[in-house]
Image: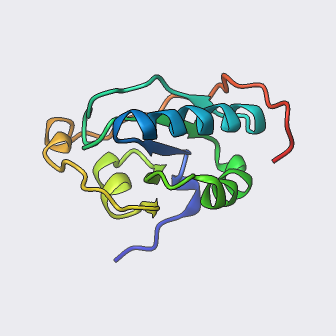
């Protein structure tokens, strides 16, 4: 197996999952805490499973330079929610299924969703939509 170079990672995604209204409320609080602390791009709410994700969620996109601050913070502040963190290397299936890490409960990923897009996908440049006001 070929050793992968770190510069293959262009950015990261954290998928914050929730199940039911109580967890959605917790996810809303976490979303606001993230926005107050980190220069990230927070995606829209998906109240139903979408793509390979088997539970409702929202996505947080962040740069490689933000990883060292954001991921440790999320590790100790995910409030019991399931969180998938994966790199964006252009190999979406591999990024989600084998080169990822989980915080909290490990959920299933719908492998069939990747069969539709077998080509390399390009991740857009991350332009943060948050303006941190609190130090992590």
Quarter occupied by residue 38: top right
Residue 24 in the image, given as x and y percentages of width and height: 45, 34
> Does 65 sit left or right of 116 as displayed?
right
Residue 126 in the image, given as x and y percentages of width and height: 60, 30
- 94 or 5, nearer to the observer: 94
Q: How many marks overall?
A: 0
Residue 50 in the image, given as x and y percentages of width and height: 26, 32
> Does 60 sit left or right of 56 as displayed?
right
Residue furthest toward the front? Answer: 22
> Does 52 sit left or right of 135 as displayed?
left
As drawn, 29 above or below 3: above
Residue 116 in the image, given as x and y percentages of width and height: 15, 35
Q: Residue at x 51, y 33 (%)?
A: 25
> Does 89 sit left or right of 78 as displayed?
left
Quarter that holds the N terminus: bottom left
Quarter occupied by residue 46: top left
Q: Residue at x 45, y 73 (%)?
A: 3
- 87 or 28, nearer to the observer: 28
Colour mapping used in the image = rainbow
Q: Residue at x 69, y 31 (%)?
A: 35
Q: Residue at x 44, y 38 (%)?
A: 22
């Amino acid at each position: 197996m070929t050793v992968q170079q770190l510069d293959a990672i262009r950015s990261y995604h954290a998928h914050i999952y929730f199940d039911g209204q109580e967890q959605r409320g917790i996810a809303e609080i976490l979303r606001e805490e993230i926005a107050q602390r980190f220069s990230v791009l927070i995606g829209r709410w998906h109240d139903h499973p979408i793509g390979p994700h088997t539970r409702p969620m929202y996505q947080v996109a962040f740069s490689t330079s933000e990883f060292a601050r954001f991921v440790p913070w999320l590790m100790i502040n995910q409030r019991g929610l399931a969180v998938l963190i994966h790199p964006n290397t252009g190999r979406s299936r591999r990024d989600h299924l084998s080169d990822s890490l989980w915080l909290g409960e490990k959920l299933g990923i719908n492998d069939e969703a990747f069969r539709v897009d077998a080509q390399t996908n390009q991740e857009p440049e991350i332009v943060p939509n948050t303006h941190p006001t609190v130090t992590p």
